[in-house]
Every structure is written in structure tokens, then in C-alpha cells.
Amino acid sequence: MAVSRRANFVTGPRLLAPADLQVLGDGKVTFEEDVTCGQNVRIFADGREIRIGARAWLGDNAQIRASVGANSIVASDSVVVEDTPANFIVSGSPAKHIWDIC
């Protein structure tokens, strides 16, 4: 895992992330409990706070530039540029809402 020296990185219990997770920028990044990250996920926190909600799943090669709500899924190769509410599935570049999780 690579974390920028300037980043304020906080993680809850049971973060499942591969060695190639990157947290970049000088903002605060908070992972709540039970977050799962795929391969090559990059989180860009340039001067802002990003929160990854509990039980969120970030797919391979996802780029995160905004917060992701609890129980949400970010599809592989997606670019999240707007905050994602809880219980959403988003996909694309930029990521768009494609389904609600009941």
C-alpha cells in the first residue's frame, strides 16, 4: 500500500486491500469497517476529505476522487468524481448510478 506523506489516512477494522492500493494527495482519507478494494485502486484526496463507507467495495483499477457511501459498489475501471450515496452501484468514467442495493 502506498500512502502519500501528506495524506491523513485513517482505517477502520478489516480493510481488505492489496499491496498496490494508492492513497495520493494531501487530504484526509477515511476507510470505515469491512471495506474491500480490488487491484490497482487509486484514491486522490487533493485538499479534501474522502470517506469510504462501511462494507463498500471498490473494483479493480477504480479511481476515487469523492466519497463512497456505505454498502456501495464501484465497478472496475470506474472514475468516481461525485459523492456516491449509500447502497448504490456506480460504473463508468465518470461513474454514474446504475442500480440501487436493497
Image: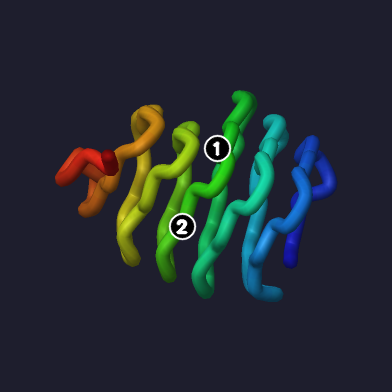
Q: For residue 97, what is the image quadrant?
A: top left
Where is mark 1, residue-wise? 53
Residue 21 location in percent, x, y?
A: 63, 65
Frontmost residue, 78 versus 35: 35
Frontmost residue, 89 versus 39: 89
For the point 60% across and 37% down, the residue is 45
Residue 10 location in percent, x, y?
A: 78, 40
User: Is the residue 9 above or below the residue 21 in the image?
Assistant: above
Where is mark 2, residue-wise? 58
Question: In the picture, which quadrant includes the C terminus?
Answer: top left
Task: Give the Cα distance between marks 2 and 1.
Answer: 11 Å
For the point 37% across and 28% down, the residue is 85
- Residue 79 as seen in the image, left or right of residue 63: left
Q: For residue 1, what is the image quadrant?
A: bottom right
Mark number displayed over residue 22: none
Crowd tier of the residue under label 2, counting other residues whose Cα lies within 10 Å: few below 14, some 14–19, many 20 or above: many
The mark nearer the N terminus, 2 or 1, is 1
Q: Residue furthest front?
A: 102
- Residue 59 as seen in the image, left or right of residue 20: left
Say what amino acid the circle numbered 2 marks. Answer: Leu
Say what amino acid the circle numbered 1 marks. Answer: Gly
Crowd tier of the residue under label 1, counting other residues whose Cα lies within 10 Å: few below 14, some 14–19, many 20 or above: many
Q: Are marks 2 and 1 in contact (CB under 8 Å)?
A: no
Residue 2 location in percent, x, y?
A: 74, 63
- Residue 5 as seen in the image, left or right of residue 14: right
Could you tell me which secondary element the residue under label 2 belongs to? strand
Could you tell me which secondary element the residue under label 1 belongs to? loop
